[in-house]
Image (tube, helix red, strand yellow):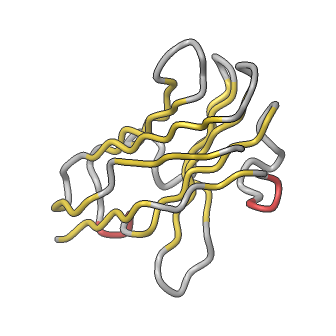
């Protein structure tokens, strides 16, 4: 049974940092795509970042240079999202997604990720 366990959400002031983590269980092998999506009230879910292998990173334009996605270890079943210089517009429910194999193309297509976490809330205040 596949499960995605997320943690690290919270409430912070603009300019501060948060780190989200997501661990997938039930996957075999190391060749997995894991990513983060977010959804603000009244808006569609959008891709924030995704990672596959050692060299394939994908980021939403609005978070480039502020967010970093990286593996916890060589097993590549746990991923972190380091979020720096947070802005109020980063507020939303953050969902971890996983897909066996390379990241889908486009990586932002939510329908192409097989497994999802329950979400963790990130609130950034001014």
Front one among 77 and 64? 77
19 vs 54, left or right, is left
Q: Residue furthest front?
A: 1
Residue at (56% x, 12% y) in the render = 74
Question: Is 9 rendered above or below residue 18?
Answer: below
Tell me what residue is drawn at x 69 percent, y 35 percent. Answer: 26
Residue 42: horizontal and vertical position, in percent? 53, 87
List the single residue furthest toward the bottom. 42
Total tally of numbered discs in the picture: 0
Q: Residue at x 19, y 53 (%)?
A: 15
Q: In the rendered image, which quarter is residue 110 located in? A: bottom right
| Quadrant the C terminus occupies | bottom left
Furthest residue toward top = 74
Q: Position of residue 60 (x, y in %)?
A: 57, 51
Say left or right for 1 vs 57. Answer: right
Please tell me whether residue 52 is drawn above or below residue 9 in the rendered image: above
Instruction: Name the image quarter holding residue 117.
Output: bottom right
Q: From the viewer's side, name the closer residue of 35 and 57.
A: 35
Q: Is residue 69 above or below residue 90?
A: above
Q: Position of residue 102 (x, y in %)?
A: 80, 32
- Residue 49 in the image: x percent, y percent? 57, 45
Where the N terminus falls, by quadrant? top right
State the residue at coordinates (64%, 50%): 97
Apparent side of residue 104 relative to residue 49 in the rendered image (left or right) = right
Q: Is residue 6 above or below residue 68?
A: below
């Amino acid at each position: 049974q596949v499960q995605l366990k997320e943690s690290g959400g919270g409430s912070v002031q603009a300019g501060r940092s948060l780190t989200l983590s997501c661990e997938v269980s039930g996957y075999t092998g190391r060749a997995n795509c894991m990513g983060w999506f977010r959804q603000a009230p009244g808006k569609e879910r959008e891709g924030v970042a995704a990672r596959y292998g050692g060299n394939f990173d994908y980021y939403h334009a609005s978070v480039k240079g502020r967010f970093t996605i990286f593996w916890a270890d060589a097993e590549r079943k746990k991923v972190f999202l380091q979020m720096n210089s947070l802005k109020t517009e980063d507020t939303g429910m953050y969902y971890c997604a996983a897909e066996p194999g390379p990241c889908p193309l486009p990586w932002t297509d939510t329908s192409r990720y097989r497994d999802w976490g329950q979400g963790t809330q990130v609130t950034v205040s001014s």
